Amino acid sequence: MPSPISGAQQRLAIKKATTWGTAVACGANDEIMFGSGQAKRSADVKVDESRGRSFSLDGTPGPVDGAATYTFNLRYAGMELIAAMIMGIAGIPTQQAATAAWLHTLKWNTDPYGLMITVAKSMVAYIEEVPTAKVTGVTISGEVGPNPLQVTLEVIGINREVESAVNTLATYANVTLPTDANAHPVMFSHLAFRMNNVGDIALAAGDRIYPSKFTLATKRKMKGEPNGQYRTTGTSPQDLIDEPSNDGFPELTLTLEFPKHSSAAYMTDLQNDARKKMDITAAGATIEGAYKYTHGWQLPHLQLKNVNPTDGNGRIQEPLEFIIHGSAAAPAGMVGVTDPLWWLITSKRTTNPLA
């Protein structure tokens, strides 16, 4: 009898794919450290309710639903592909002053059709594969304390395979982590938040704010439909979805929570519909010279949605909810940033994550 499978032994790899429904083999630099998550495969079964008997004798499985969620610690290395998939535009990174540091500028793509990944998870005794999947959501969250920032990845997969001829136990021997991808988690203490009115001068040191908790959620509304082109093989074929595409406006939101409530400033901003701009920067270990591992997010246009100080006998906290919009013109200090969000990563990766 095979040994029971332990979750601690599982490994996960993600690689850019090119053709919907066709898996690619994961290999060197494709592994990513993960906390939880597994491929899903569900389908409604149509039970035969023909009359003349008192119970069903058969059922027919319908189209496959392959939505799945994975969680990770946010790290300074090895996250470039996930970030690029949700943003949609990458490019060749810029070397920083002839050092080993490279700056990736990831921009928002209104139509990321054609961008997809293969997900391969080692279950020790076999490989669980999602041949192709669409990244539909990335949520980053964290709070003051000893835990790294968390990333929640949402995907829509075409199917779950457990006997793939592409990602096998033999090919998984080639799967490795990128340089430094098993270290350098992003901590809340690494973060700097700056915010001012959208029409003010460029963000500066005097614009620092000090939330104790935040969540940055980027979710694309996407949908795939069974259209007869993609089906499982075997004696009972099931329909599979085509590549998911835009099915509405994306939902981009930011929440901040401050540990104390001491004035009506943000409530006045809400009342006056005062628009804001913000940047968030995380700086980690030094790569070389003056250049560190970094994550940075630039948000040129924030609209307050809710300001609801907590109610209780103790210290009152102040949570804020923002809608993230695009901007008609780039605000001061954010050259070229009219998309709702830019994500900047400085790491040792020298190649375009979407190439």
Image (cartoon, grey):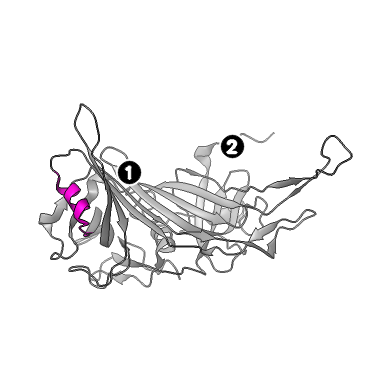
Q: Which label's residue is closer to the chain start, 1 or 2?
A: 2
Image quadrant where one finds the N terminus: top right
- Residue 333, position in %: x, y? 18, 68
Q: Residue furthest right?
A: 52
The image shows residue 13, relative to residue 317, as above or below, that is below
Circle 1 residue: 148
Q: From where the camera sits, is residue 294 visible?
A: no
Can I make out residue 257 in this image?
Answer: yes
Q: Is residue 2 magenta?
A: no
* Mark seen at residue 5: 2
- Residue 101 appears at what percent x and percent y? 28, 64
- In the image, residue 111 above or below residue 293: below
Mark-to-mark CA distance, 1 and 2 = 27 Å
Residue with the most extreme left position: 206
The amino acid on which the numbered mark 1 sits, given as a three-letter code, is: Pro
Q: Amino acid at mark 2?
A: Ile
Specify the quadrant of the image occupied by residue 352. bottom left
Q: Which residues are magenta?
A: 264-277
Q: Is residue 354 left or right of residue 124?
A: left
**Can you give x and y, in whole percent of width and height, for residue 40 in the image?**
59, 47
Q: Quadrant of residue 244?
A: bottom right
Q: Which quadrant of the rendered structure holds the C terminus?
A: bottom left
Residue found at x 20% / y 52%: 271
Residue at 31% x, 52% y is 254
Left or right of residue 100: residue 224? right
